[in-house]
Amino acid sequence: MQEMIKRIVIVGGGTAGWMSAAALSKILGGRIAIELVESDAIGTIGVGESTIPMIRRFNAVLDIDENDFIRETQATFKLGIEFRDWGRVGERYMHAFGRVGQDLATVDFHQYFLRMHAAGKADGLAPYSINAMAAAVGKFMRADPRHGNSPLADITHAFHLDAGLYAAYLRRYSEARGVVRSEGEVVEAVLRSGDGNVEAVRMADGRLVAGDLFLDCTGFRALLIEGALDTGFESWTRWLPCDRAWAVPCAAGPDLLPYTIATARSAGWQWRIGLQHRTGNGHVYASSFMDDDAAAAALMSSLDGEPLAEPRQLRFTAGRRRKIWNRNVVAIGLSGGFLKPLESTSIHLVQSAIARLVAFFPTAHPEQADIDEFNRQSAIESERIRDFLVLHYHATARSDSPFWEHCRTMPIPDTLQAKIELYRAGGRLSRHDMELFTEVAWLQVLHGQGVRPRGHHALADLLDEEEVAAYLGDIAEVTRNCVAVMPAHAAFIKAHCAAGDPA
Ligand code: FAD
């Protein structure tokens, strides 16, 4: 038998800390002690409300009942993100989750679409996506496998949730499975002489919390991974210049939108995330292109409900920690790096870091080769997400402000350049095996932002134009008919997972 580690210490109790505690307490089944230390005085970042469909896998591993989860976190369902004014002012498109169209045997659906688009006989991709069409009219239902091949069996959803309620929910879950929570501020990490591993963290009251493996979930403070271990940070601000945000909740409107709205502004963009009990709003901006007061005023003047609090400012640097796992510390959440919330990937990166930690779970004597591979995979994953985000800023025709002029003309990562070039050539999309976003996600954003290929797949010309028109027309018609029988989003929540008063 190999020697097991005996104690895991999680420092930080935001979304990252409690997701880690919940998953590890479930998976380890109480056989390794877990203690979570958090400081009420420091608090959490409090934003992070929009998710992607992978979160459902996380909930499934935890055996969480989805209706209960919706109730407890005041959540709504999310079918995608609508991008407004990104390619050009006045334009909008949806990055919808799930499938778009239905592939034929040899050639992908989108190649036929591109052919018809080039001929002026097709416009956007939305008519071929049940998620996009349902979102547009505020409808929702869960995918129902009883519908066989129909799009109704293929609806892909995520959630908008209240991050504070989610952390509280996971805390109850974790404590019920033996996680010990300690309140108080960590003032320093005690390093072991010799290997330089973290031996314990010292609390403000002098108490030492010792462990074999430490998860740094301290958010932007990165107390262990950077504060104690000086791991280093790779900044991506040259590609992702936004570095601040104002966030404010406002009263929820009568319609619960089953999608996030991301509206481009003159020096950044604004999010709108509808929950059951309130709407989350935020204005993400580049401080080198807009001052703080102007950014706050732009946010407050564009709310669609009464503000429920004063706006709160957040500051950040896009980029990633050079190593997510260093010695016996694994950085999970904002301590590991930050990518813009544009495609709601941060909570997912928490989830995938936990999954990777489980895959590479160390013995009491970890192998450096395992740690290196963990770090290599983490780096590729975040670089590919970075590229996807940079695409949104860069592939634009906007030149109406210095910010957009900068984004449109800035040099971009080679990996992204290669993807765009491939698509421009013949509408082809390639995906790295460590890559989160699928070809169809890239397609929707490339097309939505106005990138047009010079040609399409040669074999998409084997059918004559009437046949292709009929093929696309059939998919659009079936999709419309399916949406017609779906219930309204608000009605679905009321019927299946209505919330009482939030705690
Ligand atoms: P935090 O929430 O900051 O938690 C840190 C924890 O560490 C707290 O419990 C704190 O008390 C504790 N702590 C810190 N220092 C100490 C100490 N010395 N002693 C003891 N405890 C300590 N993600 C998404 O997926 N979707 C979104 O829509 C989204 N929107 C975002 C918008 C903005 C503007 C920003 C900045 C982020 C957004 N995110 C989003 C990211 C998301 O908020 C975070 O990834 C997520 O909340 C995880 O945060 P965290 O737990 O790492 O950090």
Image: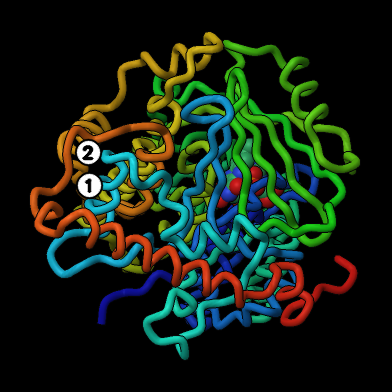
Label annotation for residue 179: none
On screen, 22 above or below 200? below
Q: Does dot 1 land on a helix, a strand or a loop?
A: loop
On screen, 166 above or below 408? below
User: In which image quadrant can residue 424 be found?
Assistant: top left
Amino acid marked by disc 1:
Leu
Q: Name the residue under label 2.
A: 423
Q: Name the residue under label 1.
A: 429
Q: Mark 1 and 2 residues: CB-CB less than 8 Å, in contact?
A: yes
On screen, 143 above or below 74? below
Residue that appears at 43% across and 39% down: 448
Of 473 and 36, the residue lying toward us: 473
| Relative to 283, 200 lies left or right | left
Which quadrant is home to the N terminus?
A: bottom left
Q: Residues within 10 Å of mark 1 (few under 14, many from 20)?
A: some
User: In which image quadrant can residue 118 be found?
Assistant: top left
Amino acid marked by disc 2:
Tyr
Q: Residue furthest bottom?
A: 146
